[in-house]
Structure formats: C-alpha cells, structure tokens
Amino acid sequence: MEDKKNLIRMADKIQEALIKLKHSRYLELMRQLTSFASKLQEFTAESRKMGASLVHGWFTAAERCCSRTSRMLNDISYSISQIQQLTESPQKKTPKLSLLVEELNQVREEFGNVDFDKAESTVSVVTDPITLDDVPLGPFRIQLELDKLSELYKDRPYRVIALNPNPAATDEEVTHPHVSGNKLCEGDGCVTIRAALEEGRICDFFTVVRSILNTYNPDSPYVALYDWNGEPCYDCGYVMSREDTYYCYYCEHDFCSQCSTYCRFCEETVCLGCSTECPHCEEMVCQKCIRRCTECEELCCKSCLEENICPNCKEEMEKENEEQECKIAGTNQNRNPSQPDTSEAEIKLAS
Amino acid sequence: MRVLYIDNDGGGFADYVDVTESITVEQFFKDKMQGRKPDNYLIRVNRQPVPRDYVLQENDRVTVTPTKIEGASI
C-alpha cells in the first residue's frame, strides 16, 4: 500500500514537472524568436554598412561585411533549426496521473526497481553492470531531476552516475565513452529522449538512455575504449592518451613529451636515454647520427666533426701545427747571420 | 483497426496507425522496421513483453526501442 502511495507521489511530481515543461516550451520559443529578430536587425545594419562601403570605394570594409554576413548566416540557420524543433512538434497533452503510474510500474519491471528521492526531487534507476569492448564500466544510475525537467530545451534534465566507476585513465570525469561529468552525450538518441520526456514516457526515456550506455560509438567518444587505460611513459610513468605518446625506435618504448625529443639531423623521434647532446653545438642527436672523434673518441654530431675530428681535437691539432711552425721558424732565426744562405751566396756570385 | 505505435528508433514519436486485423506483432515489426532484426529491439505491447505470434488488438500500445543507440562526445 505504502509502495503504491509512493508511486502516486512520484507520478504527481512528474506531472507537475511536465506542466512546467509545457510552459517553458513557449518561454523558450519566445526567447528564440527574440534572438532571431535581433539577428535580422543585424542584417539590416550590415546592409547599410555595405552600401556605405561601396559608395566610398572602401573594399576592405566591404570584405569585412562579407565575412560578418557569412558568420551571421551560420548563426541564423542554427536559430531556424532551433525554432523549427520547437514549433513543428505539436504541443503534447500532459499525461494523466494513472498513465504516469503505469509508466513507473513499467520502469520497475524493466529495471527491477525505481527510486524516488522526495527531497532532491529525482526519479532514478540503476542499470546492470556495463562492459563495452571488454572494458568493465560498472553499473550506472540514471537520475531524472524533475526540478530541471522544465529546462529540457536548454540542458539535459538528468544525470548518469557511475556507481562503480572505472574512469578513463586520462580523464577522471569520463566514466563511459559517452559520459563526461555525469552528462550523457545522447548522439542519435537526442530527439527520442526529448520526445519521450515531453510526452511523459518515463520508461522509454530510461530504456533509451540505457541503450545508449550499452553501445559504443567509436567515431565519437570522449575517450576511445582502446585508449581507456591510457599509456604510461616508460621513463617517468606519466599516464597519457596513446595519441600523445612518442615512440622511440631505438629502445622500442613509448614516452611522454617531456621524456622524448627528436634528432636534429634525421628528425626521428627518440627518447632522452637513446639520444645524446652534442657537447659542441648542444643539439640532441640520435644514435644513428652521432659520430665518434677519431682522435679523442668523444661523441659528437655529424656537423661538428671535420674530417672525423671534433672541434677540440681540431683546435689542438692546429695549435700543435702552429707551434711546430714556430719552432721551425725559431731554428732558422738561431742560425749564424755571418754565414749567408746558399741562395744569397749564389746571387752574389751571379752578380 | 488502430494501434498506438511508439517508435523509439528515429524521432521517438507516438502515432496511431492502421493495421490489418489479426496481424501478429512479428509481422507488424517486419512492416514497420523493414530489414531490421527484432533481436536488436525491445518490443512491448501494452507495456509487456509478448510472444512473436501475439495478435494485435484494437488500441494496443506497441513500443519499439532499439537496444543499441550510438552516443557521441559533444
């Protein structure tokens, strides 16, 4: 008996919310029409500006008018579709209390139970545990917030709460490929959900939401299931999405952006461990592009080597050469100036 | 004869439709959801599951809801 009373209370609250929703549809339509009218006025203003631009030969200004008009056309087509949605479907009759009780009874049969939180003014059901592509996501509570039902044309009046959450490794808010921050992205179910709520078909609403939760759309997830657990950086352990990883072909592991770099010569991605900083130009170089100086065997990039000799060795060699030349020059100067060179003597003899 | 048909596959609209007498729910589904498999739908008549050979009655309420609907991310 108490249970039946509870269902009637719940149905009564839903009916009240549906009456408010009816009113809010007209309010929303009025808001959309006002916005549409003001957009039309903007077109008039734009037309005046275009006229003035042409009279004065201001082609840059005319071009700006064109791009503004193009932007406004996009806005206006969106406005038209919003208005059409509100006007084309005829106003739904508010369902009788008995019909809403039947709905709630059906919800109970489909889901095993239906909870009514009088204080929070919510009606909710719990799904079976959901597993998509072998990723266990746990059961979800679908919670219809009756006080927000009148906001149906602006926002989703329900929440989808993971009861045993297994969120995506890269985003705690994403508890299902199509749920972020307890909000479901309805995709193909959007129109059906709205129609079900407008008509007070509460059971259809819950079953459609459940069908969306039981389906994975790989073309448009918040986080793809193949990437659900993320990929840890082999070096620092930071967990990231697969798209954000950098693969090192030398050690064959995935790294984050902080732990990887690229070779300045071949532009290959390489981890910090498999790359070497050239001590001369300080650029990062991969193992394939690094060379060893034939003199000191120091690692060095290709461009800093000259005939396989590093700049340090080159400098030393040049110093040595210079010193040797100096020595030779010094030996010549130390000879007896009274003894003329053969060539000088020859010159003298010749003269 | 008329039945109330609620199609949750597309727009989710509820409409009265004319059907032939003694049509089964299986035939009704085939007519309305051509090329679709009944296994992929939750079919209820008067809010109850029924066998495929259930013969529709005047003013029956038939609901067809897909068990798989693709969500999105925006």
Image (cartoon, rainbow, N blue to C red):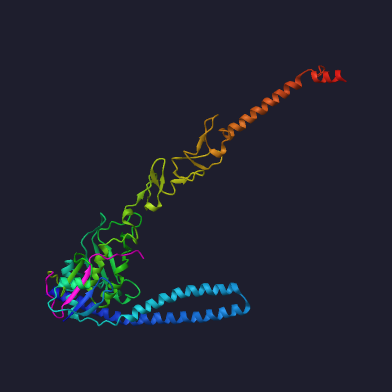
Q: Position of residue A102 (x, y in %)?
A: 17, 76
Q: Residue at x 31, y 82 (%)?
A: A23
In the image, which residues are magenta?
A: B52-74
Residue A232 in sight from this viewpoint: yes
Dominant secondary structure of the residues highlighted in magenta in the image: loop
Q: Position of residue A61 (x, y in %)?
A: 58, 74
Q: Position of residue A11 (x, y in %)?
A: 20, 77
Residue A341 in sight from this viewpoint: no
Q: Position of residue A104 (x, y in %)?
A: 18, 73
Q: Nearer the viewer, residue A182 or A287?
A: A287
Quadrant location, the N terminus of chain A: bottom left
Residue B14 lies, with reference to residue B69, above or below; the image says below
In the rendered picture of this protein, how many numbered marks are placed on residues? Answer: 0
In terms of image quadrants, where is residue B53?
bottom left
Residue A304 lies, with reference to residue A178, above or below; the image says above
Q: Residue at x 58, y 31 (%)?
A: A313
- Left or right: where A110 falls relative to A182: left
Residue A215 lies, with reference to residue A23, above or below; the image says above
- Left or right: where A102 falls relative to A150: left
In terms of image quadrants, where is residue A37?
bottom left
- Left or right: where A298 falls relative to A87: right
Quadrant location, the C terminus of chain A: top right
Q: Nearer the viewer, residue A31 or A118?
A: A31
Based on the picture, tell me whether residue A87 belongs to the magenta stretch: no
Q: Nearer the viewer, residue A350 or A186?
A: A350
Based on the picture, tell me whether residue B54 belongs to the magenta stretch: yes
Q: Residue at x 38, y 42 (%)?
A: A252
